Image: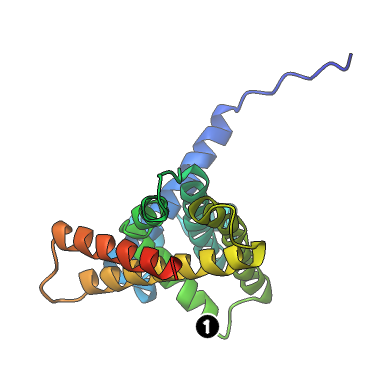
């Protein structure tokens, strides 16, 4: 019988390093949310986080790598939201509501606006490294891998695998688009809709999408 070596406990130094890394990412997200991506310079992030540039270099290497770590944080949270989603109900509409709620809960979080700014800026900046662009593309592909299982749970056994892939991606894009629209409206100096209005939009979205799936 093969023996399994005991796992070494994480020492105090590693715990402190992990806390520092998490704190820097947290502060970067807050900075981007509160002041915009352009304001999140290396100098400003260190000032807000109360650390030296050497600390950020140690944990991330460059500002771009720090921003990629922010993106990866958002990806991890989205992946967890999709993995934990429970699709249930006796009708397509009920199951679709579960699908929408899982995505809605993630995309309506304040942090999403920061994650979106990071992705847009890294994707469109001509100085972004090829390795970073590849990481962004790979993360997009990773999210797509979870959608077919969710789509199958919504649609049932009838549609083909190809139809499930296409429909689940469509549903995902529609929900994300509506959530993004609300996030942008929240960020603008206009009168904002209340939670009840958001819930009504969500219900209407589910109704319209469910009706389209029946055709």
Res 31 quadrant in image? bottom left
Q: Looking at the image, which residue sits at the far bottom?
A: 126
Which secondary structure, mark 1? loop
Q: Residue at 13% x, 76% y: name it.
A: 190
Q: Residue at 16% x, 57% y: name it.
A: 195
Q: Position of residue 16 (x, y in %)?
A: 50, 36
Q: Is residue 15 left or right of residue 202?
A: right
Res 140 quadrant in image? bottom right
Q: Is residue 72 left or right of residue 50?
A: right
Is residue 70 visible from the viewing direction of this image?
A: yes
Q: Position of residue 200 (x, y in %)?
A: 20, 61
Q: Position of residue 170 (x, y in %)?
A: 49, 70
Q: Residue at 84% x, 16% y: name it.
A: 3
Compare residues 6 and 206 and report the one nearer the observer.
Answer: 206
Question: From the image, which quarter does the C terminus lie in?
Answer: bottom left
Q: How many marks?
A: 1
Colour scheme in use = rainbow
Question: From the image, which quarter does the N terminus lie in?
Answer: top right
Above or below residue 91? Residue 124 is below
Compare residues 184 and 105 and report the one nearer the observer.
Answer: 105
Q: Position of residue 196 (x, y in %)?
A: 14, 58
Q: Residue at 37% x, 56% y: name it.
A: 93
Q: Looking at the image, which residue sits at the far top?
A: 1
Is residue 43 visible from the viewing direction of this image?
A: no
| Tag 1 residue | 125
Compare residues 121 and 152 and report the one nearer the observer.
Answer: 152
Above or below residue 120? Residue 213 is above
């Amino acid at each position: 019988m093969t023996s399994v070596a005991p796992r070494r406990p994480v020492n105090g130094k590693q715990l402190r390093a992990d806390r520092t890394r998490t704190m820097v990412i947290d502060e970067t997200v807050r900075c981007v949310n509160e002041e915009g991506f352009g304001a999140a310079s290396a100098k400003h992030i260190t000032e807000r986080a109360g650390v030296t540039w050497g600390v950020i270099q140690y944990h991330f290497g460059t500002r771009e790598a720090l921003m990629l770590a922010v993106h990866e944080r958002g990806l991890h949270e989205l992946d967890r939201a999709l993995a934990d989603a429970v699709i249930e109900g006796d009708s397509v509409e009920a199951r679709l509501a579960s699908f929408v709620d899982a995505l809605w809960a993630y995309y309506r979080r304040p942090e999403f606006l920061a994650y979106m700014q990071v992705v847009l800026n890294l994707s469109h900046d001509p100085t972004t490294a090829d390795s970073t662009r590849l990481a962004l593309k790979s993360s997009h592909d990773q999210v797509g891998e979870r959608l077919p299982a969710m789509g199958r749970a919504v649609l049932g056994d009838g549609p083909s695998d190809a139809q499930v892939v296409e429909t689940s991606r469509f549903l995902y894009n529609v929900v994300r688009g509506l959530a993004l629209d609300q996030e942008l409206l929240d960020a603008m100096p206009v009168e904002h809709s209340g939670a009840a209005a958001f819930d009504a939009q969500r219900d209407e979205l589910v109704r319209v999408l469910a009706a389209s799936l029946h055709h």
